[in-house]
Amino acid sequence: MYRWLNGPGAAFRDPLPGSTNYLNAYDPQGNLVRAVANPTKDRSMDENDTKGRGEEGESSEANAGLGRNRLDQNIAGRKPIPKEMADDLMPFPLNRQFRSQPVLSEELRDEIFRRINKEKQSVRSVSATLGVEMQRVGAVFRLKTIENQWIQEGKTLATPYARAVSAMLPKTPFDSRSQAPPLPHESINDLPVHSATTRQLFHPVPESMHFNRASAAKVFSRDLLPADKRIPHPELVELAKVAAQHRGRNDIVRERRNELEQQEAAVLNMRREQKAAQEAAAKKIDTPRWQFRFESIKAEGAGKDGRAKGGVGARYGIPPQDRKKGQIKIPTKVE
């Protein structure tokens, strides 16, 4: 162990800043593979030196010093160190199928919070612009809000721990000074799997019939929307269609942004009206300590099995029936 610590392991004594520093990024002699000009040639030379000198600790220390000198030359500016490759992002050498996925950098998280909090952009717009899925954008905004609240309250944050963990992981960078579009963090328009599409079926179609995505959705379920309507960002499909007309990008983005703002305003107005209608329909009785609310219900709202969303008690959760006696737990027919 001490031979490895004084030899190839010496490269991990002073971790390379801005890199993940996983074991697979270094060769057996402690050299950073992507930092050398010709990794195959240098690796073969190091192996020949090791064979000539044997397995002595002095050989390991010399090879580690050679790799550290090359690394110092790269850091000094003589040759820039390339970005991590796929083989460099394997933290477990025996599990070559696992790749460490990038996380959001601190600059990107701050930009997400700034656009939503100060510029009042919607979560959908920020997700489409920065290439981060909407669930993650919402989570970042909530966590940054709590962080700012804790700072105002004078609570202690685990900032050193967060920086140490962030330094070990690949990150998606963001540069506010760059004019280039930001690097997407992940795929934001993956089609969610609907329960109605998990079964396999064969549907005969006449040759003269125009069969498209909407027709395929109706085959699976009468209420199922087509694929281009169920994706998280259907507006990107419309944007691509408009871009195919060879119009200016700025005009396209401006028109699409106005349409999204109008749609979001309509949705907010509809939710306000629904909430106002619910408040008006509820009968309220105030007491010194509590306010009792009474709402009219219909027994038919619970459905045939009494487990529909419109039934009383649905908001508190309904226990499943699978552990009750007398319940049939095996399929009774095959469709």
Image (cartoon, rainbow, N blue to C red):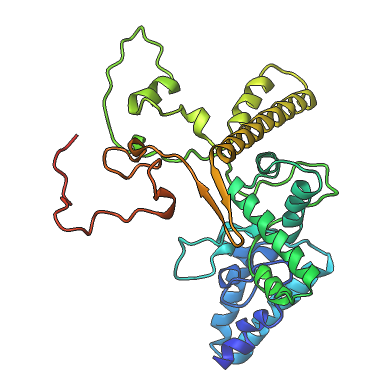
Determine if residue 59 is in view.
no
Residue drawn at x 27%, y 29% as measured from the top left: 201
Rendered-image quadrant of the C terminus = top left
Residue drawn at x 35%, y 28% as measured from the top left: 221
Rendered-image quadrant of the N terminus = bottom right
Q: Nearer the viewer, residue 194 or 184?
A: 194
Residue drawn at x 26%, y 42% as measured from the top left: 305
In terms of image quadrants, where is residue 71?
Answer: bottom right
Residue 54, percent across and down?
54, 87
- Furthest toward the top, the residue is 208
Image side of residue 135 versus residue 147, left or right: left
Residue 94, percent across and down?
45, 70
Residue 59, percent across and down?
62, 86
In terms of image quadrants, where is residue 13?
Answer: bottom right
Q: Nearer the viewer, residue 52 or 90?
A: 90
Marker count (numbered): 0
Q: Is residue 252 above or below residue 279?
A: above
Residue 303, percent across and down?
31, 38
Image side of residue 331 versus residue 216, left or right: left
Image side of residue 284 versus residue 328, left or right: right
Image side of residue 249 versus residue 132, left or right: right
Q: Nearer the viewer, residue 82 or 105?
A: 105
Determine if residue 253 is in view.
yes
Residue drawn at x 33%, y 9% as measured from the top left: 207
Q: Is residue 34 above or below residue 249?
A: below
